[in-house]
Image (tube, grey):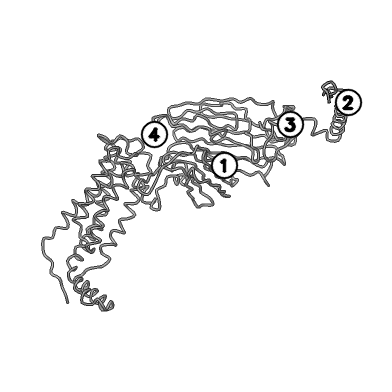
Amino acid sequence: MSQNQTGHFLDPKTLIAILILGVAWMGWQSYMTQKYPDYYSSQPTEEQSIEGQGAQTVGEVNKNSDSGKVESVDTQTVKNDEVAAPEVIEEKTLIYSDNNISFELSSKGMGFTNLTLKNYTNRKGERLTFNKVGNVLPMETSVVGVKSKLDFAIEKVGDNRFVGTAFFDQVKIVKAIEVKSDDFLFDTEILISGDSDRFLGLSVNVVKPMENIESSTFTPTFERQEFFVVNDGSDERVMLSKEEAIKKSYPKVSVASLGTQYFSQSLVDRSELIPEFRLENNSQLAKGTLLYSALNKKSDFKVAYQAFMGPKDLDILEKIDGQLAGIIDFGMFSWLAKPMLHLMKWFHDLVGNWGLAIIILTLLVRMIVLPFTVMSYKSLNKMKVIQPQIKTLKEKHKDDSQKLNQEMMLLMKNNKVNPLGGCLPMLLQFPVFIALYQVLGQSIELYQAPFYFWIEDLSLKDPYYVLPVLMAITMFIQQKITPNTMDPAQAKMMMFLPLVFALFMMSLPSGLTLYIFVSALFAILQQMFFMRDKNNQAVVTA
């Protein structure tokens, strides 16, 4: 075909076809508009999509609305639980600042941004801040099943009180926050009035970016990211890592927290409703959502909770709620750890230095368990005295285990040796030392607290490893002078234990290493004093 015979795009046949299609399309649209007038009277745009339920027509929240904003309606009071909606609310922030904290309160969900703890810094020396992660604000409020945030008209109604009003469908939501900065606490009440089948309830979020935390068998750390939940009276701790994604749900929650070793975002429920808590994390963020369901509730009801964003200070947490104090991981012996922490604080008030307070507390604990320690040493010493006789009996009755056990029991009875005497006192001391170990690893009081000389932060490892080396030396000396009943091969292997323990302690807080060093040094001195063998004991054989 020659060029002059080629059909042009705008030839008559093509134009007629386009015209026919256009007329058909307009006719179809006219038909659909008459058949479904409610839908086509307020057609949503692609950017206005949301998840879940909550779709409305004119005068209500648009179906699939990404902004969650309310179309303008008559703002006069509507009778019979119909709540009028205001004009679309533009984003607004209010600023708060005092000696302890500062923050910006956003109209988007009345969530916090740039919430700064003025008296605390992170490991880089920057002021510690709770901030939004992606598009999620700490403590923001949303409608259950709706992806977008509620738009609140917010105002400051006092020195430390904020109130916001939002609308969803025919439901009015009034949120009030009272700031108690001394306790890093935000008392929150949300009043819900009006009714809608599409209103399923409210949710509030805690959120934090995931961090890289390196830990191994020989380089352990107390650093962590975790959820802590009190569900139906039982608490659970969920450790997080960037490598493992977790999703869990708890149906009857009274306390929910997302925190690190020393700081936390927490929610304490104060409602008649029992909320559900959902937690999840990925490699980028960890998020927890507290959900208050509106199903089967009266049209008007109230949600109340206390939001905490601050340091894990035991005194503050116990003042807010006894269950909230559980966010500090004192381990299985928390009933011992808490009195120890209060005692250490009292010593600090006396001497003004947390390192000295640790030393005094360590010495006091050693004095308290001293009777058990002396019992253990004496029992081990008696066992050492009769070891030659035990060795003889083992050679004599090596082919008769029953006879050997009978002879050994008779030998111990005649020499008043209790085979459990060396172990039992040590087991009684075990809870005390484990509790103190947890106190020194978890207490915010040691965070960035200096000791003397090269120790500038008792919550960090010794930068020059002086304390781990001194601890290993004292443990080695203690092991050498402690009576033992092990065979030579086992004794040689045990000599490597101080070295292994020193390597283990190199990455742990220097305050903890200080405690173990002082404890081992005290053990050497007490053993040298109490275990002097002034009189040679004779072995009774029969």
Which residue is label 3 attached to? 44
Left or right of 461? Residue 112 is: right
Whichever of labels 4 and 3 marks the residue nearer the N terminus, that label is 3
Whichever of labels 3 and 2 marks the residue nearer the N terminus, that label is 2
Rendered view: 201 above or below 389: above
Which residue is label 2 attached to? 13
CB within 8 Å, label 1 to label 3: no
Can you say which quadrant of the picture contains the N terminus?
A: top right
Name the kind of residue labelled 1 in the image.
Thr
Q: Residue at x 21, y 53 (%)?
A: 478
Whichever of labels 1 and 3 marks the residue nearer the N terminus, that label is 3
Residue 289 - label: 1
Left or right of 69? Residue 32 is: right
Name the kind of residue labelled 2 in the image.
Lys
Q: Nearer the viewer, residue 450 or 352?
A: 450
Q: Residue at x 39, y 47 (%)?
A: 216
Look at the numbered disc 4 and give the secondary structure of its residue.
loop
Whichever of labels 1 and 2 marks the residue nearer the N terminus, that label is 2
**Marks 2 and 4, how far apart at CA:** 75 Å
Which residue is label 4 attached to? 123
Q: Residue at x 53, y 43 (%)?
A: 281
**Marks 3 and 2, how far apart at CA:** 36 Å
Name the kind of residue labelled 4 in the image.
Arg
Q: Residue at x 26, y 35 (%)?
A: 452
Q: Residues within 10 Å of mark 1 (few under 14, many from 20)?
A: many
Q: Residues within 10 Å of mark 2 (few under 14, many from 20)?
A: few
**Marks 4 and 1, how far apart at CA:** 28 Å
